[in-house]
Image: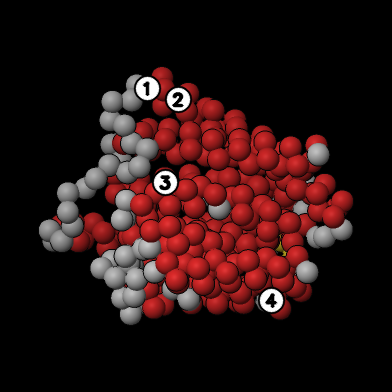
């Protein structure tokens, strides 16, 4: 029971600390005069990926690199099949009128590069530099494109990003940042230690625990955001959240983690899980390019595919 309590406590702490860090970082950035657009593309994206990042780095330091890779690959599969599937079952996602083609192409490019690098046998310093270089290029491209559209009058009035509070006092900003920065490493350590004990007791590998238990846990914030977006009929937020999260997982999390130590790629990932991740990403083509909505029946299909995938991994 204790390992499960450690894992759950670590997960809760990660979610809470990650939210506090995002709120603090967003308001500090806006207080310093950073445009809200840039904050949305950088600070929020990095902040919401902080739990996965801390888990991956902790796993490397604890000699559990399989947990780090399994977490990222499993999270990307869960983001497409579960995070989009469940909200679609509840309310459907009207994606027909939203254009996320550029971001989707960037995600597919990131996935292709990630899979290619995986066949080198491990993610080392060279791989990390390549992934982070690609992330910097994509972020620069998206920022310049968004600013160009704004200058040409093609964008609407800029809304404040989620978590922004123009009236927040400086003391609260510092408190949120401190609690987030303190809570994240503690939560990551608890979750990694608990998950490792669970894996050992169950006789499965750290990679399998990363692909299932940890991946589902770290996808909960994205799931909550997407459910609320579906209920509010904000399909662009839901789809964009998944695409952006998957891209950051591959390029940012593994890119940074590889700077702290090599991540050997298990044969099972090369033979099965990476291709499931790539296939799940390709399932979005009809909704991105053919202007199809993600209906309740489609959501049921996506969720069923995820249940099937988990069953195959655990078997």
Q: CA distance from mark 1 to mark 4?
A: 49 Å
Q: Is residue 279 above or below residue 2?
A: below
Are the residues tagged 3 and 4 within 8 Å (C-beta)? no
Residue 95 coordinates in the image, percent (x, y): 32, 67
Q: Residue at x 39, y 69 (%)?
A: 295
- Of helix, strand and loop, which one carries label 2? helix
Query: Which image quarter: residue 156?
Result: bottom left
Q: Residue at x 25, y 68 (%)?
A: 97
Q: Closest to the observer: 123 or 27?
A: 27
> What residue is shown with label 1?
170
Q: Earlier in the sequence, mark 1 or mark 4?
A: 1
Q: CA distance from mark 4 to mark 2?
A: 44 Å
> What residue is shown with label 3?
44
Residue 79 coordinates in the image, percent (x, y): 52, 61
On residue 11, the disc is none
Q: Earlier in the sequence, mark 1 or mark 3?
A: 3
Are the residues tagged 2 and 3 within 8 Å (C-beta)? no
> What residue is shown with label 4?
272
Q: CA distance from mark 1 to mark 3?
A: 19 Å
97 to the left or right of 17: left
Q: Is residue 269 above or below residue 61?
A: below
Residue 61 coordinates in the image, percent (x, y): 75, 47
> What residue is shown with label 2?
174
Quarter occupied by the C terminus = bottom right
């Amino acid at each position: 029971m204790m390992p499960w309590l450690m894992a759950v406590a670590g997960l809760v702490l990660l979610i809470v600390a990650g939210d506090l860090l995002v709120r603090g970082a967003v308001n500090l950035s806006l207080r310093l005069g950073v445009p809200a657009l840039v904050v949305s593309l950088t600070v929020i994206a990095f902040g919401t990926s902080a739990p996965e990042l801390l888990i991956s780095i902790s796993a490397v330091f604890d000699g559990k690199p399989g947990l780090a890779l399994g977490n990222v690959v499993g999270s990307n599969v869960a983001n497409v099949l579960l995070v989009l599937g469940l909200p679609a079952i509840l309310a459907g996602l009207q994606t027909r009128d939203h254009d996320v083609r550029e971001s989707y192409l960037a995600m597919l490019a990131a996935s292709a590069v990630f899979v290619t690098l995986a066949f080198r046998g491990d993610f080392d310093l060279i791989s990390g530099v390549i992934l982070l270089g690609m992330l910097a290029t994509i972020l620069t491209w998206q920022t310049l494109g968004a600013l160009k559209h704004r200058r040409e009058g093609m964008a609407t009035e800029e809304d404040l990003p989620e978590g922004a509070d123009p009236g927040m006092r400086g003391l609260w900003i510092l408190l949120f940042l401190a609690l987030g920065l303190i809570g994240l490493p503690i939560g990551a350590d608890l979750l990694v230690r608990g998950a490792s004990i669970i894996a050992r007791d169950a006789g499965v590998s750290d990679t399998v625990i990363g692909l299932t238990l940890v991946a589902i846990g770290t996808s909960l914030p994205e799931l909550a955001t997407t459910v609320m977006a579906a209920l509010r009929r904000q399909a662009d937020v839901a789809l964009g959240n998944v695409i952006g999260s998957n891209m950051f997982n591959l390029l940012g999390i593994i890119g940074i983690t590889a700077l702290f130590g090599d991540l050997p790629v298990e044969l099972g990932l090369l033979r099965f899980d990476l291709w499931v991740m790539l296939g799940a990403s390709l399932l979005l083509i009809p909704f991105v390019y053919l202007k199809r909505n993600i209906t309740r029946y489609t959501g049921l299909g996506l969720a069923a595919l995820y249940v099937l995938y988990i069953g195959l991994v655990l078997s």
